[in-house]
Amino acid sequence: MESRFSFLKDFNGRRHLEEVYEDNALMLYALQLRFDIEDIDSVAAEALTDGPDDKKCDLIFVERELGIAVVAQAYNKQNPQITDLAKENKASDLNTAAAWVFSDESNKVPNTIKDAVIDLQEAIKEQTVSTVYFWYVHNLDENNNPKIETEMRMLQAQVQAAVDSKYPNEELRISTLEVGLNTIQKWFENSTRRILIENDFIVDCKNGFELETEGWRAFVTAVSGKWLRQLYLDKGDDLFSGNPRNYLGRGKRKNINSGIIDSVQSEPDNFWVYNNGVTALVNNFDYKEKKLTIKGITIINGAQTTGAISEPEKVDKDFYIPCRFIVCSDKTIIGSIINNNNKQNEILPSDLRSNDKQQERLRKEFKKYPTLSYNGGRRDGKIIKNKVVFDPYLVAQTVMAYHGDCVTAYNGKKRIWDDDKLYTQVFVDQLSSEHIIFIYSLSKALDEFKNKLRNKKEQRTATENKQMEFLSKRGSKMLIIATVSECLEDLMGEKISDKWKLKFKDSTNFDVLLQRWEQIISTIIAFSNNLDPALQGGLKNKEVVNNQIQAVKNIVASVQPMLSSQLKPVIDEMEG
């Protein structure tokens, strides 16, 4: 099947996924492709559910920054053949998943998914999630069993009706999708080439003008709203293959989209002056005799405009939208075009963080470590293989948690980068690549510790089940990182004069660092009962968090001689 589905070669080459996540590996691979996730292990540690009582939810992924959530059920057929049919009952199981995800009685939700369900429901009420996807992920050809598509359509209608009743003011969109080999192949192609739609189009537009530099050429014009609307209705979200976001809907929080829809219907003549316009990447364009022809297209800025003008059932009068069509073959420039176009809605000093002097410095420092990758916010859409990827958002979170504020770290993933005050608290002059490696390896070691517990399944002891339950709670990782930081001085048995200088004597072998942290994690996790109150209702109350961390610190201090002796081989590898 690899000749037809070329992504399989890439997937099969990533042995780590199958070794660690087994039947969930393909589901995580698909999630990473679809949402351009850099560190899939960290996402898996939070999003994967655990145990037989997961109520048909193998994964619950909530991403407030994208305004989406994914509830997924996975099925992997052993030794699949090209003609095999995916199981229909697995699609039906998503009905059960939906019932629990939107349950009114959270006290009856099993512990294995309770925190994830509460987190999703809170995100919906906060209107930071406007679309919930229900995925049926399998390793077979979707075309073989058309009954599943029918099942998924019925599911979407039923769940949409239910959430419309439960959340009458949120305008929550439900989307169901069968994610088999064809869909994953499309996402794989999308990840390797920005422009997924390669057809030729004659653009209905006004006159325009051309600009050109050594790195790119562009045609600036005003396109017919009816033409763009029909293009989206025909091509769907493939039109946004090069865009960090799809259309987010017209929910209350996205009221700019509601405003666009109103303008289309009530003031079409004024739409051009009201709207910032659309930017599209194309493979080529040609303007002759007042006719513009383009080859291929992806809208990299203006997904909300494009989606919103497609919402009304009918548009009587045409209207025009400012538009730029850009041709560029330089991947670095393309990445910068996409990043900068999608940051212009928020005029903040943080818009160009990837070019900040601290990020430039850290990228240079990381070049000393060829097996590690830190991009400092400069993304080019490529999934990096055979390296440990340091997700810049998770780097910021873990550093902030380690240096005393795990509440902001957990709840402010994007805010740390957007807010100048928070950003400068994390990315200080003292922050070195070695210190980042020191903290990030602790974060990854926690992910591995949890995965080992998960994979033990029914072989877990009663104590291990309690640890697994604790680590399944949202915010537990940031809390443990903060606790380890607070207890390190007692574990080391000596004064730490400057926490920012702490590092491993040798940071080159990342796998060895994970093993070192595992011994310390095993020590701290033994006191999870003392930390548990800090997670009640979410990791939100700084006073409670600090009190519970202090309680653990006091216990550690009381048995310090024993722990220092036990952990001496690990502590000896640290310096600062």
Image (cartoon, rainbow, N blue to C red):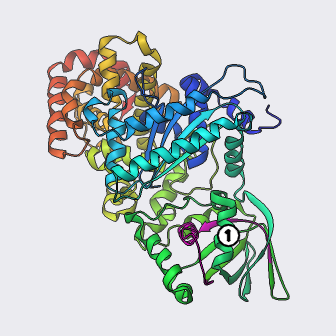
Query: Which is nearer the eye, 561 or 216?
Result: 216
- Residue underneath mark 1: 230
- Residue that extends furthest to the right in the rendered view of this protein: 289
Residue 384: image location, x then y, percent: 63, 43
Q: Is residue 405 left or right of residue 43?
A: left
* Count of picture labels: 1
Give the crowd class for mark 1: few <14, some 14-19, many >=20 residues within 10 Å.
some
Q: Is residue 353 above or below residue 177?
A: below
Which residues, given as a range, are shown in magenta? 293-319
Is residue 169 visible in the rendered image? The answer is: yes
Query: Which is nearer the eye, 119 or 466?
Result: 119
> What amino acid type is highlighted by mark number 1?
Gln
Query: Which is nearer the eye, 310 or 123?
Result: 310
Residue 120: image location, x then y, percent: 37, 44
What residue is rendered at 42% in x and 10% in y? Answer: 459
What residue is rendered at 45% in x and 24% in y? Answer: 451
The picture quadrant where one finds residue 289 is bottom right
Q: Quadrant of the N terminus?
A: top right
The picture quadrant where one finds residue 231 is bottom right
Residue 47 is covered by the magenta coloring? no
Q: Quadrant of the C terminus?
A: top left
Query: Which is nearer the eye, 335 or 264?
Result: 264
Residue 449: image location, x then y, percent: 41, 24
Q: Is residue 294 above or below residue 47?
A: below
The picture quadrant where one finds residue 78 is top right
What residue is rendered at 61% in x and 45% in y? Answer: 33
Secondary-structure class at tag 1? helix
Residue 9: image location, x then y, percent: 75, 34
Is residue 508 visible in the rendered image? The answer is: no
Q: Is residue 359 above or below residue 508?
A: below
